[in-house]
Amino acid sequence: MPKIETDNLALRRGLFFPTAEIYAGAPSGFYDYGPYGCTIRRKILELWRKELVQKEGFVEIYGRQILPEAVFKASGHLESFADPIIQCKKCGSWYRADSLIAEKTGKIVPESLPLKEMDAIVKESKLDCSKCRGKDFSETKKFNMMMKVDVGAMGQNVCYLRPETCQTIFLDFARIYKTNRLSLPCGIAQAGTSFRNEISPRQGLLREREIGQMEIEIFFDSDKINDVEKFSQIENEKLNLFLLKDKMVSKISAKDAVSKKIVSGQLIAYFLARVQQFYQKLGIPLESMRFRELEDTARAFYARETWDFEVETDLGWIELMACNYRTDFDLKGHSKESKQDLSVVDNFGKKVLPHVFELSAGIDRSFYVAIDLAFRNEKRGPEERIFLKLPSQICPYVSGIFPLVKKDGLFEKAYSIFEELSSENFEVFFDEKGSIGKRYSRMDEIGVPFAITVDYDSMNDGTVTLRDRDSLEQKRVKISALSEIFRKLLNGRTTFDKI
Amino acid sequence: MPKIETDNLALRRGLFFPTAEIYAGAPSGFYDYGPYGCTIRRKILELWRKELVQKEGFVEIYGRQILPEAVFKASGHLESFADPIIQCKKCGSWYRADSLIAEKTGKIVPESLPLKEMDAIVKESKLDCSKCRGKDFSETKKFNMMMKVDVGAMGQNVCYLRPETCQTIFLDFARIYKTNRLSLPCGIAQAGTSFRNEISPRQGLLREREIGQMEIEIFFDSDKINDVEKFSQIENEKLNLFLLKDKMVSKISAKDAVSKKIVSGQLIAYFLARVQQFYQKLGIPLESMRFRELEDTARAFYARETWDFEVETDLGWIELMACNYRTDFDLKGHSKESKQDLSVVDNFGKKVLPHVFELSAGIDRSFYVAIDLAFRNEKRGPEERIFLKLPSQICPYVSGIFPLVKKDGLFEKAYSIFEELSSENFEVFFDEKGSIGKRYSRMDEIGVPFAITVDYDSMNDGTVTLRDRDSLEQKRVKISALSEIFRKLLNGRTTFDKI
């Protein structure tokens, strides 16, 4: 279960909380973000867009969540996107069979196990219901996790809420390839929501029914998987690979991962390296990351090769991104079902049905883990200081701005700094309430990296105190230099101690 | 129907297009955005956030789209969010009764008309089915436009996709008020999606089933509706008010609108003025805007006073934002249904159930109208030039960057400018393909305001040609000055002719 301190902070500062929480009986697995959480979440998205989309020369689209049934016939979800579930015969509670087995016995069974075998394990493990302790369960059955929506006056159009955002990218691929004059390899990204009817989700932001995803589908000619222009930029970067065969993390350079055929090719290794770089910018230490190789039975039905990007927390290793080599499974499926030829002609006149490498990240999971790993509780004598050591780029504000007192023009001076920095597009927070200590501590708890205090000296010499969240150091700086200082700090061109 | 030229451009450049268009039979009323459209849409959202949320000191939240049934019992949608529909007895086609009457006879009947009276009008108008010309229709019935979703293994939780994003704001209000230490008046904003099961939508982005909304709910003490601190800043601003009593637009100052009791108070007039300012920044001319006063029968069931913000296009007046005085209807409803006291204590210790003034804008409609009004088709002799005269702040890129030729180091020089500007967070587009004229014209069509050309002189004197989309003027500027020039152009601190 999520770390209690992080969750308490989240509730106290309204970072996130259950959807429709004022109603008893609202379904679990839905979470809203309050203002600070909403801003951090948005900035994680912006960082993803900058680092993994724009820097790669990829494009981003925005598609709809309700899609017709034919899409999921083609994608395989209608048939294969199902969990094994069982019901307690005494109280009627539903469980995912594999999860209940894991919870009660510690045994990991693949969710794709044949139903008869699942039944046998349920029986021999003598599971009991977590609610009523009953020991009699129904037979295992498959439950499709897609949520159905009827569109039209009489529900003429059977549709589903998409269970993964990427289907939109496959549907729109041919048009985008043409209108945006793309050539292979190319990447199409989308940030959006997908929906999964999870059985009794109880893990906060880590197991949701309405899921934020940021996905990138990289389309390429499978003959050219080793023809990656920028490979040399990362070839010596060490990848933290958790290989099936040795059940531990090995640090293997991108170059070696390719030459030893640990990955299918340069294109895969290149993006695994970029994913590590991205999550480091989110504040995740390299030593807490790994790519876990998935075995055949654990991979999604569309994947030939999967690397789950996982981060270690107090809750164990948490998957933040699935890196799936989907081959031409999806474009082939949609070509067949829609009777449209989705192959493209490359720059050399060759007709190609592209293969796809996918980087499918959970926004909410990335958010949760970033917050959780940033959480600090420092004891200093009798006092304790809670702060979020978030990287500046994803903080809700770059700085708090405080007048020491409200009188003698200090309020107005501080407010003019607030207005000036706002007009320069810096997100800053004005706070004149309570002691300076309390104001600092409120900023600390939501991860604001800096704070400006306007005092009596400011009125004479045009300087303010700039305080650093992490070191607690304070420096005296010119008001006129603030915007340049923040620009450099945010761009990583300087650090607080060098100001 | 949407203007054909705008729609052609949209398809040609992939700005937007029907969702799942490769599948025949995909339901209407869903549209995806390609890369350029997606970026413009995102920038409209960013401008809204900056102008109407952050500048007002409001906060933004992010909530989920699936909400339990109890929410809509409280909000009134379960009972009242329904359209009158009829079916052709011959071919089975469904119509909104009021729309079919309007289409065939030009007669405007309120959708809230009693069903018997609707039937009488259908009969006496001798309507015929648009599809099969049949003249025999079923009796009118009410059709609830919410889309139902069953959550849980056996659909134990009856839920709906929210028909308006604002319900999330009402549900989360009490927590946010506390965790963010708000005081009245305060505003809570949200950008997100809502869902309406429209009958046979056929108006492109103007009538969708999955709708982008950017909403702001302003909570205030109804006793203090005339106690607006910043009112003096806009009191002389003229509002374009289309009043019921005189059926034409009158330009009335905010101050007069209050003193003549045309609006309920200062708070309403203040935000109507701010809405006009916002849409001007989106490129909508003041003379094409109006606030239309809605009569009792046309207002939504929760509103005491409604001003529909409309913009004139070739398609007629299009509603982009509903400005609804919702009173305490929503908080009262949720208090009653959830049995939670949603009133708050103000700074003076007074317990208040706040009233709400709502600014509910359609993202997709705002996008469509911004594009449509920006569309230019200029004939210059035998040539024609198509361009989008979009304001810089919502353009997909600030500038194109073109090497005149690929050889002699020009490509590398241009690419280094691209990388430098990208690292400064400017969104720029690199294009080396085709003649310079073609490259200009591709940028023109998606509204990119500037273009940089790197030529042989650039290699010697470190200058480039900067071209202005609207005037077609070109200036020679220093490469080292580009980022400062763009910063000033985007901030509105300079214009192209003053560079």
Image: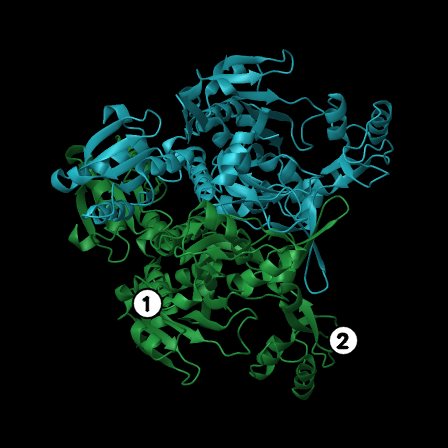
Chain colours: A cyan, B green
Q: Residue furthest left?
A: A460
Residue A307 locus on image (x, y percent): 59, 24
Q: Name the amino acid type tagged 2.
A: Lys
Q: Chain of mark 1?
A: B
Image position of A82 (left or right of B31): right
Badge 2 element:
loop
Depth check: give the residue in front, A75 or A127.
Answer: A127
Above or below, A69 against A462 in this view is below
Q: Which residue is mark 1?
A: B285
Label 1: few (<14), some (14–19) or many (≥20) C-alpha neighbours in 10 Å = some
Residue A22's disc number: none
Image position of B192 (left or right of A121): left
Q: Residue at x 42, y 36 (%)?
A: A446
Q: Which residue is mark 2?
A: B89
Residue A51 locus on image (x, y percent): 42, 33
- Specify whether disc 1 shares its chain with disc 2: yes
User: Is label 1 in contact with label 2 (beta carbons under 8 Å)?
Assistant: no
- Distance of mark 1 from mark 2, alpha carbons? 47 Å
